[in-house]
Amino acid sequence: MEIGSYAGNILHVDLTKNEVKKEPITPELVKAFIGGLGLSVKLAYEHIKPRTEPLSPENTIIIGAGPLVGTIAPGSSRIYAVAKFPINNAIAWAGAGGMTFGGMLKNAGYDNVVIKGRASKPVYLKIFDDDVEICDAGELWGRGIEETSEQLWAKFGWPAGIITIGQAGENLVKFAMSFVDNASTLGRGGFGAVMGSKNLKAIIVKGTKGVRVSHPRKFMKLVDGLFQRIKRWEHLDEWHEFGFWLGLPVVPKEMYYELNKRRLSCIGCPIGDKDVVEIKKGKYKGLTKVTTTAINAVTPSLLGLSVEDSIKCTGTLDDYGMDMFEFFAVLNFVNELYGHGMITAEYMESKIPFNLESLEKWAGKIANREGFGDILAEGLPGIINKFGRESQRFAPPMSKGLSVYSGPTGPLLWDRFGTMELTQLVNPRGAHVAAGGSPTYYAIRPLEKFPTHLDRMGVPESAVERILPQPRDWQWGLKFGLVSREDKAGLNVGRLTRYSEDWLSVLGSLGVCARAQINRFYYANLLAELYSAATGIQIGREELMKAGERVWNLLKAANVREGFTRKDDSFSERWLEEKSQFVEYTGKVKISLEIADKFLDDYYEERGWDVERGIPTREKLLELGLEDAAEEIARAGI
Amino acid sequence: MAGKIIEIETHPSKCVGCLLCQLICSFNYEKMFNPSKSRILIERSDNGFKINFADECTLCGLCVQFCVYNALEAKR
């Protein structure tokens, strides 16, 4: 049966056996898991056996592009990857603005790619329609992200989509990322190292088959409506002019103007927030860099570097293919250990200075695992392992082995405890903000605005009064001062986070970008209509949201199977108490461990999970049709 | 806007490579979203993108309507 807007096939690649084969998708599979993130999670659950070593040939990479990817639904280019990550042994998702990759994958005739095994020598995977080939990558091995991408484009031409690793991935650095089209990042928990462990330098994809929708007229009517709203948006011109700077103006406007060379976009995106920046003065005059946003490129300036040195530094880190946030977390950690006499001169002669020369030197040592860089390449858990449990109290705040990067002490400074903060703890993949991408980040939106937003996110009406409880209905909120009797309502971040994750799950499974500038134009009803028109599978808002919930529960179940429980979602005392700046969303009280634990309780309860253990109940898994996961967890006695 | 389009003027410096033009063009003429079947051709260049048109272009102007970055302008 042909289903509209799906390519219709899963591509299986076994790098050990040098084999490729196609498997058709089925209506049952896509009805339950939609595609993109959801189908990737489902395939990961099947293909990654419990306790698989993340850097072994048995670990499996699944990459997916949802049903709306490749169509003209605005901002539908998102790709997702799922694998077991080496930083924390979690079955983890990674998402990226797909640039051309997702659209080309669909055009080549595939919704998902499943890659297992290990090639006997460095290879890249070439997917050009039915021509799928595992090619020798000897010439590319050892090269950075940019050079690898450019060489592949020189050989095969743009708009081929490219996922590649740099030296950090090749050398199994546990916070190595992959890059999409030299612009977007994929997987801060070591997805790049998983590719490296398979001797897989890159994946290049190009297709000519096209993406057809089932009900073109209806589909285009919905798309036209979206474009009309986008064109009318009062901030559209500003976004085109300033990009992500508008959301995070970390450098003066004049400086942004000076740096910005031009903007790049993923396929089908009317916002286009990738930047190409150029250093206009000084030693590095003329150096250009493609970046996921100009703001990322200048983030090290918050640590005292000049803007020019920041761009040079992030360029180096990106080219090696390693996560900037984790790089700085690791350096801060060892400096602190050194300061406390816990690292001796055998490893470090002095604290690592945060200047460009030193940072580039250490980036190289880590990416190539030279000297002490070999230990740093293991990430925060590896350093704790090396220097003993007592070193842990000096570790930066972290969750599941990754540093939390928003909060009062993170690079993304923010003192409010919202969904983007809580999700860094409960997210099965470890610290990452996107699944909490509810409205809490850029502005403290008034609570009166929430009901409309919740409706847009597909939150059922019955849950709204739990998320925005009246004081009389929120006893613990009253007790701890999160709400007063005079307030109309409070905000229960724990309960909201569940729906924020489900919303990401739906967007990710369809392929719609989760960034606020795009997802603000979408709402659950519209997505259900778009999906129905595109695929010919009639689905309503509730069913769509249920699929999102199913995906997130299966992801959690995959990690429960690995042994993750509530203890792994626990709060870092240091994160909450350092500088004593974390305050509740409405700013009333400081967040204590006790309050944070209450939010956790409510998060699990809203998910319908076992609150004490922080895992899905058998009843919840059965309700979602996840019988296999329920049985497996029961059999394992978890 | 009334009047027949006589030319589509391009402003490559404004092009971000989103391919919305190619998506809508291929959909209109080939009934599928397929950049390789489009009559407007976006190519990556050293300093951004180049915009060209295939001989089959009918100057229907759909690409102009969908270019939200103002890289295409209809002359009537």
Image (tube, rainbow, N blue to C red):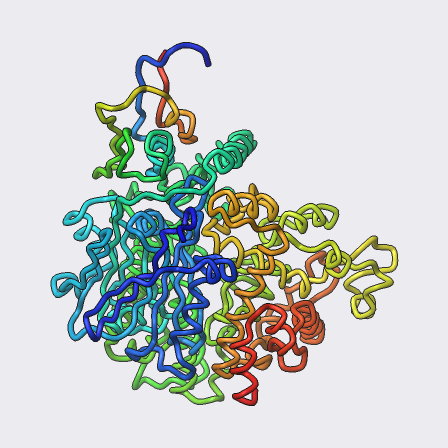
Compare residues B59 and A564 and report the one nearer the observer: B59
> Can the viewer see residue A290 in this picture?
no
In this view, B45 is above or below A177: above
Q: Is residue A288 left or right of residue A77?
A: left
In this view, A235 is above or below A19: above
Q: Is residue A479 left or right of residue A514?
A: right
> Residue A303: percent from the left, percent from the top?
43, 60
- The residue that appears at 57% across and 63% down in the rendered structure is A407
User: Hey, which residue is sitting farthest front in the picture?
Assistant: A1
Q: Is residue A268 left or right of residue A134?
A: right
In this view, A302 is above or below B53: below
Corner quadrant of residue A134: bottom left
> Residue B44: percent from the left, percent from the top?
24, 39
Q: How many marks?
A: 0
> Residue A356: percent from the left, percent from the top?
31, 60
- The residue that appears at 83% across and 58% down in the rendered structure is A470
> Residue A108: percent from the left, percent from the top?
28, 50
Q: Which quadrant is the C terminus of chain A positioned in?
A: bottom right
- The residue that appears at 32% across and 12% down in the rendered structure is B6
Corner quadrant of residue A83: bottom left
In this view, A466 is above or below A539: below
Compare residues A388 and B49 and report the one nearer the observer: B49
> Can the viewer see residue A458 in this picture?
yes
